[in-house]
């Protein structure tokens, strides 16, 4: 029997201490779009969108069920890809008074080498902004 396979991530959830502060950071510092949405019970929830990706926001202490076993602000570590040079991000972070934790540094991404900058969101989640690097072709054997 063939095992079914996964194809992509639809969304992920961040548990946050303040929805408005989180929206402002991800919108103003990272360029995401605030995307409120109405669910089946008629209530409005909050999400962040960038490209085809979505991050749902849950307020700590008022998470939606089902939820993670121990949801807590500041426990995420996200790597986000960019097509902009990291020097532009460094200038943007300086202009928005966003402290760079580390970088630029070489790292290993899901599909190959990346170069990354690290910042933290208002809850202390680690946010890695990364540029994919070209993969060097294998060297020909000259034996």
Image: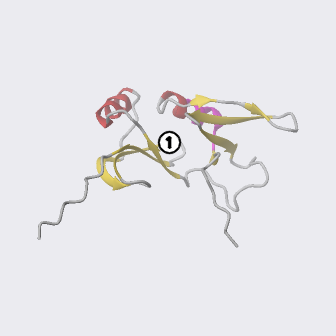
Q: Position of residue 64 (x, y in %)?
A: 77, 48
Q: Which residues are magenta?
A: 17-24
**Which secondary structure is most common in the magenta stretch?**
helix
**What residue appears at the point 54 percent right and 45 percent down from the top-left corner?**
123
Residue 12 in the figure: left or right of residue 26:
right
Foreground residue among 51 and 73: 51
Q: Which residue is mark 1?
A: 121
Quadrant location of the N terminus in the rendered image: bottom right
Outermost bottom residue: 1
Residue 122 is covered by the magenta coloring: no
Q: Quadrant of residue 86?
A: top left
Q: Position of residue 57 (x, y in %)?
A: 66, 41
Residue 18 is covered by the magenta coloring: yes
SS at circle 1: loop
Foreground residue among 43 and 107: 107
Residue 38 in the figure: left or right of residue 6:
right
Quadrant location of the C terminus in the rendered image: bottom left
Q: Quadrant of residue 98?
A: top left
Q: Position of residue 29 (x, y in %)?
A: 47, 31
**What residue appears at the point 55 percent right and 34 percent down from the top-left corner?**
50
**What residue appears at the point 74 percent right and 48 percent down from the top-left corner?**
63
In the rendered image, the vertical position of residue 51 relative to residue 106, given as above or below: above
Foreground residue among 143 and 124: 143
Outermost right residue: 41
In the rendered image, the vertical position of residue 58 relative to residue 137, given as above or below: above
């Amino acid at each position: 029997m063939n095992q079914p396979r996964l194809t992509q991530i639809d969304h992920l959830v961040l548990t946050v201490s303040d929805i408005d502060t989180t929206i402002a950071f991800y919108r103003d510092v990272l360029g995401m779009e605030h995307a409120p949405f109405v669910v089946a019970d008629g209530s409005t929830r909050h999400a962040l969108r960038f490209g085809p990706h979505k991050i749902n926001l849950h307020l700590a202490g008022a998470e939606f069920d089902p939820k993670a076993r121990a949801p807590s602000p500041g426990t995420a570590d996200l790597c986000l890809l960019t097509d902009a040079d990291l020097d532009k991000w460094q200038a943007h972070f300086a202009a928005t008074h966003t402290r760079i934790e580390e970088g630029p540094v070489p790292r290993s991404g899901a599909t190959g080498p990346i170069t990354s900058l690290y910042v933290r969101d208002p809850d202390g989640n680690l946010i890695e902004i990364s540029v994919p690097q070209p993969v060097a072709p294998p060297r020909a054997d000259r034996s």
